[in-house]
Image (spheres, rainbow, N blue to C red):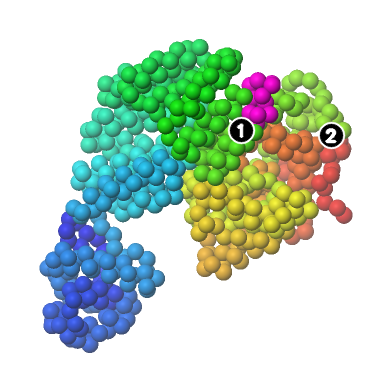
Amino acid sequence: MAVEGSGDVTTVHEWTGLEAHALRLALRMSVRVFAQHLGVAPRTVAKWDHLGTVTRPRPDTQAILDTALARADSAAHLRFETLLLELGQEADQGLRVTRVGPRAWDYETWTDDLDRTVVALSRQSFSYAGDLLNRWLTRYDPHALDDKGLYLFARSTTLLGDLQRDQGAVAGPLSARRSYLNARSIYSQLDIPRRIAQLDLSLAVVAEMAGQLDEAAKEYEALAVDDRLSPRDRTRARLWVGTALSKNDKNDYAARLMTTAIREFESLGEPEDWSVAHQKLALAHRGAGNLSEALRLIDLARSTAVTDAPMQRVRLETAYGHILISDQATVDDGLMILDRAARQAAQHGLAHQLRSIEGIQRTIEREIRPPLPRRSGSSRVSVKQQVITDEQWQHARTIWDYHQMHHDLRRCDVAIGLGSHDLGVARAAAELYNAGWFPLLVFSGATSPTTAARFPRGEAVHYREHALEVGVPDEAILLEPNATNTGQNIALSRQVLADAGIQPGSVLLISKPYMERRAYATARKVWPEVEVVCASEPLELDDYVSSIGDPKLVIDMLVGDLQRVIEYPKLGYAIEQPVPGEVHDAYQALLRAGFDSRLLTP
C-alpha cells in the first residue's frame, strides 16, 4: 500500500480500496463515471469506497488502476496525495504518501524551510527546528536524489548537526559528529570544497566540546590557513585555536591568538564575532590569573553583544560568573550569576552549557569544602561526626562500581525515569531523549519521607517539569504518580503504558547511578518479557558525593542498596544477582564501620 513518486509521477505498489477511492475523488468522477473509466462494474467501485483498506483489487484491476493514475495530470496527482494523507489519518493508517524524489516545487519549499531552521536555531527554538528538518530528512532516500536534492539533504544534515551540537549531543550514533560526517560525505560526492572545509571546522568544534583539546587545536590551526574557507571562517578557526589552548591551560599563547583574531574581525566588519572573541579572551586572562583584565574584557563583551539569543546570554553569564568566582571577594556574586545561567540553560535545553556550569560549580564547591580523600593523601577525614578512612572510601568505590550495570546504550521503545530524591534522574532522562535514544518517557514516583520536602507535588511531577524546561515535548512524557517503591515503579509504569496502548519490547531504565543493579533485578522479576537496558547520570563517586553534600549518607545509601540487592530475591521482589567476593568483603567492612543508617529494618 506504500505510495512512491519519481519526478512528477506517483505510483502505488499495492492498491486497496482506500487508494482507489482517493483516485476517484482526485479525478473528480462519480462512481458510475469512474467505473466506466476503468472498465469495471459500478458495484466494484462502491465496494472500494465502502471497505477501504480491507479490500484489495485483483491483479488485473491493480494494473488498470496503475494506468489510470499514470495518465492523470499533475493537479490530479497532487489531489490524490493530499486525499490519501487525509483518508489515511482518518483510517488511523498514518502517512500513506512517500516519494523517492522531490517535485520541482518541493525544492523551493525545502529551501525556505532551511532558512526558517537557521532562524529557529539562532533563537534556540530546538523543537521547531527539529520538526522542520525531519520533515525533509525522513521523506527522501538520499540515494534517489539528484544533485540539487543531495545538496539540500546535506544542508539539512549539517543543520541537524548544529541542532545536536547546541543541545550537547556531540558524540555517539545520534550526535552532531555523526551528522557532520554524513553531510561531509555528501558534499565530497558533490565536490564542493568550501562546504567540506566548513564541516571540518564544525567537527573540530565538537571535538573540542568532547574534551579532545589537542586534536581540536591542531585541526583549527590547519583550517586557519585553509583557502577553501572564507576570511571570516579562517579567523574563527584562529580564535578557536586560542579557545582550545586556553582550556588546556596554555593561556598566554591563547591570548595572543585571540587578540589577533579580534583585530581581523574588526577589519572584516563582524561585530558579533568581535564581541564573542572578547568573551573568550576574558576567560584566557582569567586562566592566566589576570582578573582585572578579564573583568574589563568581559564587561566589553557584555556591553557590545549583538544578539540577545539564549545561547549567547548563557555563555556571557557563565563567563562572567566564572571570572567572579576566581576572586575570593566576589565568589558569592559569581555563584549567584552561575545559578542564573544554569536556570537559563535548563529552560532552553542547552545541555552542554548546563554541564559546563555544573562542572564549574562543583569545582568551586570542592575548593570551599574540605577535599574528599582519594587513593592517596591524608589517611582520615572527619565528616558529619563520622571518620572516613581511605580504605573505607576504596570499599565505597568498589560497591559504587558494582551497582552500575555498565550497559551499552541502545535505542529502546520507551524509557522509565525512576523517582527518587535525585533530580539527576530527570536530567539524564531529558538528555537521553534529546539524543534520540527513545521516543517516549514515563516518569514514575509519588512522594516519600525523604523526598516530600524537595518534591512536594510528587517525584514524577517534578521530574516532568524539569524535562519540559530542557526541551522534552509534553506529548513525549507519561506520568505515573503513585509508586512508592521500585517494584511499583516498574509495575505501575507498565500499566500506564498498557492504558496508552503501548506494549514495548525494550525499556531503558533511568535511575540514580548506584541504583542501576537493583532496578535491573527488579524489572527482570516484575516484567520479564521486556529487554531491560540501564542508564544513569554519568558521575564518578566523588562528583556524586559533592552533589549530595554528605559523604556519610552517600556511603550509607550504597550499603543499603547492596543489602537490598542481596535480600530482595529471597523475598520475591527481584532476581538474584551475583555478588563478587571483593564486593561482599567491602560491604561487610563498611557494615562493621557503622555505615548502616539505610539498612532494611527487621
Q: Which element type, helix, strand or loop, lies under badge 1?
A: helix
Q: Is residue 521 visible?
A: no
Mark sitting earlier along the chain (1/2) = 1
* Residue at 29 percent of width and 52 percent of height: 140
- Of residues 112 and 84, the one nearer the viewer is 112
* Residue at 14 percent of width and 78 percent of height: 38
What amino acid type is highlighted by mark number 1?
A: Ile
Q: Which residue is mark 1?
A: 337
Residue 124 placement, left or right of 598: left
Question: In the rendered view of the protein, which quadrant contains the N terminus?
Answer: bottom left
Note whether 576 is above or below 165 in the view shown.
Answer: below
* Residue at 14 percent of width and 68 percent of height: 72
Q: Residue furthest front?
A: 303
Where are the magenta residues, as a range?
325-335
Q: Is residue 23 visible?
A: yes
- Of residues 418 and 12, the one nearer the viewer is 418
Q: Which residue is mark 2?
A: 384
Which marked residue is nearer to the observer: mark 1 or mark 2? 1
Q: Which element type, helix, strand or loop, lies under badge 2?
A: loop
